[in-house]
Image (spheres, rainbow, N blue to C red):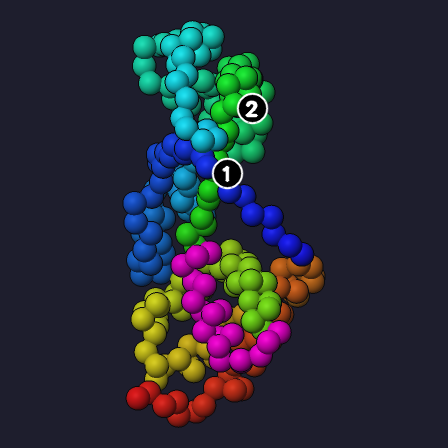
């Protein structure tokens, strides 16, 4: 499969409002777990508008006038565009916002003026623990594991979602990411035990679907590394 090269030039404007400033492992939880605004997995988002080639002069006052904002002199904010009810789930709120007349007007303005939208999101939980899989793949040193490492990373993330408390307790015990070399094998064994424990719980409730299949795949990889791992690794 060939990849088409895009040599177009764009002017991008970024916004990162409401992103977390630090994401750390604090004991057996994340440092943001006490923040009610961070109930889902914390995501770091960069987004904004973009123009092909040079930026354009837009009549922002005219746009705000067409939106019939309650406070047109203020900076354009989401809360001015639409009022979301507290009972709405994130999906319901998203659908409700997109159906709002002000957003329809805004998007029509973007289309008319060739304004693009760019969006990039990083799941900080997913990216914080990728080193575990990358090190295990180096341990097995098999081509198929290199090829499927992104699948294994998804499997590890699934384990974190299934048993966050158990996983973070294990990470805290071995001071991840600073796991001592002489404790690496013990760490792998306990990680394997955590996988098997959660797999058994899934089978107890007759869940042999995607969750179980992902934990089985992850368990095979970790077990393979344990079998290959030297009992007395060379730490020099």
Say what secondary structure mark 2 lies in.
helix
What is the magenta segment's predominant secondary structure? Answer: helix
Residue 159 seen in the current view: no
For residue 98, the mark is 2
Across and down, in percent, residue 196 comes to: 57, 72
Residue with the most extreme bottom position: 232
Q: Is residue 36 left or right of residue 202?
A: left
> In front here: 11 or 21?
11
Q: Residue 109 at what x, y percent from top left?
A: 51, 16
Q: Tell me, yes or no, whether the highlighted magenta stretch contains residue 137.
A: yes
Q: Which residue is drawn at 59% across and 63% down?
A: 151
Looking at the picture, tell me which residue is in the foreground, 144 or 34. 144
| The residue stretch that appears in magenta | 126-144
- Residue placed at 35% from the left, 67% from the top? 177
In the rendered image, the quadrant that contains the C terminus is bottom left
How crowded is the residue under tag 1: few (<14 C-alpha within 10 Å), some, or many (20+)? few
- Dot 1 corresponds to which residue? 8
The CA span between labels 2 and 1 is 29 Å
- Residue located 41% across and 22% down the image: 56
Mark 2, Cα crowd under 10 Å, few <14 / some 14-19 / many 20+, is few
């Amino acid at each position: 499969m060939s990849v088409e090269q895009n040599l177009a030039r764009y002017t991008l404007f970024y916004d990162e409002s409401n992103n977390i400033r630090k994401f750390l492992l604090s004991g057996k939880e994340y440092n943001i777990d006490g923040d009610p605004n961070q109930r889902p997995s914390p995501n770091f988002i960069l987004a904004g508008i973009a123009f092909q080639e040079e930026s354009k002069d837009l009549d922002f006052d005219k746009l705000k006038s067409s939106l019939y904002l309650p406070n047109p002199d203020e900076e354009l904010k989401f809360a001015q565009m639409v009022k979301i009810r507290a009972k709405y789930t994130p999906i319901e709120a998203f659908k409700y916002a997109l159906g709002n007349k002000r957003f329809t007007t805004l998007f029509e303005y973007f289309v008319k003026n060739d304004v693009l939208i760019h969006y990039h999101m990083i799941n900080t939980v997913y990216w914080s623990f990728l080193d575990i899989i990358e090190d295990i793949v180096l341990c097995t040193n098999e081509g198929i594991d290199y090829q499927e490492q992104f699948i294994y990373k998804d499997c590890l993330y699934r384990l974190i979602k299934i048993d966050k408390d158990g996983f973070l307790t294990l990470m805290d015990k071995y001071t991840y990411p600073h796991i001592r070399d002489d404790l690496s094998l013990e760490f792998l064994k306990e990680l394997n035990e955590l996988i098997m424990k959660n797999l058994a719980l899934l089978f107890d409730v007759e869940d042999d679907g995607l969750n179980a299949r992902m934990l089985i795949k992850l368990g095979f990889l970790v077990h393979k590394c344990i079998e290959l791992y030297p009992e007395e690794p060379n730490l020099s």
